[in-house]
């Protein structure tokens, strides 16, 4: 992999991490609020159903994760498995696609169905 591509991947992961930081914070604050308010799973799902703000928030969360994961998984494959180049990137891409499909399906299931 050439230096230019490595720089792009590094930037891509850092930009997605910058997006994830506030999203994770908001997610954790929301969980803490729900627990302290004594909300049941049914009550939480009722609040989320057809709530486009939460749907948009979690769709953005999923997109940021799906952008962040492939680079990290590829780096892990390089360091732990000694995989190089395309092999590591294919593994990372597969994980990213899995996160994207499963995450958006979950958002759809909770918010829209």
Image (cartoon, rainbow, N blue to C red):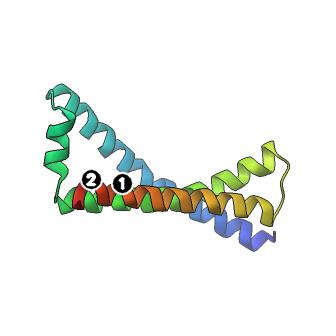
Q: Position of residue 111 (x, y in %)?
A: 23, 57
Does the rendering let one see residue 9? yes
Q: CA distance from mark 1 to mark 2?
A: 6 Å
Circle 2 packing at 10 Å, graded few (<14), some (14-19), many (20+), is some
Q: Position of residue 91 (x, y in %)?
A: 70, 58
7 displayed left or right of 46:
right
Circle 1 packing at 10 Å, graded few (<14), some (14-19), many (20+), is some
Q: Quadrant of the C terminus?
A: bottom left
Badge number at residue 106: 1
Q: Position of residue 55 (x, y in %)?
A: 26, 59
Quadrant in which residue 12 is drawn: bottom right
- Residue at mark 2: 110
**Residue in the image at 82% along x and 46% along y:** 81
Whether residue 105 is situated above or below residue 36 in the rendered picture: below
**Residue in the image at 79% along x and 46% along y:** 79
6 displayed left or right of 64:
right
Disc 2 is placed on an element classified as helix
Quadrant in which residue 50 is drawn: bottom left
Badge number at residue 53: none
**Residue in the image at 38% along x and 59% along y:** 105
Whether residue 33 is situated above or below residue 17 in the rendered picture: above
Q: Residue furthest front?
A: 113
Discs 1, 2 touching: Cβ within 8 Å = yes
Disc 1 is placed on an element classified as helix
């Amino acid at each position: 992999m050439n230096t230019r591509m490595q720089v792009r991947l590094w930037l891509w992961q850092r930009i997605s991490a910058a997006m994830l930081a506030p999203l994770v914070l908001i997610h954790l604050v929301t969980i803490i609020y729900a627990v302290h308010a004594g909300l049941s799973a049914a009550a939480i799902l009722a609040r989320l159903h057809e709530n486009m703000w939460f749907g948009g928030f979690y769709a953005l969360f999923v997109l940021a994760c799906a952008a962040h994961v492939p680079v990290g998984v590829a780096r892990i494959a390089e360091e732990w498995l000694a995989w190089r180049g395309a092999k590591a990137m294919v593994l990372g891409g597969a994980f990213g696609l899995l996160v994207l499909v499963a995450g958006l399906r979950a958002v759809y299931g909770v918010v829209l169905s």
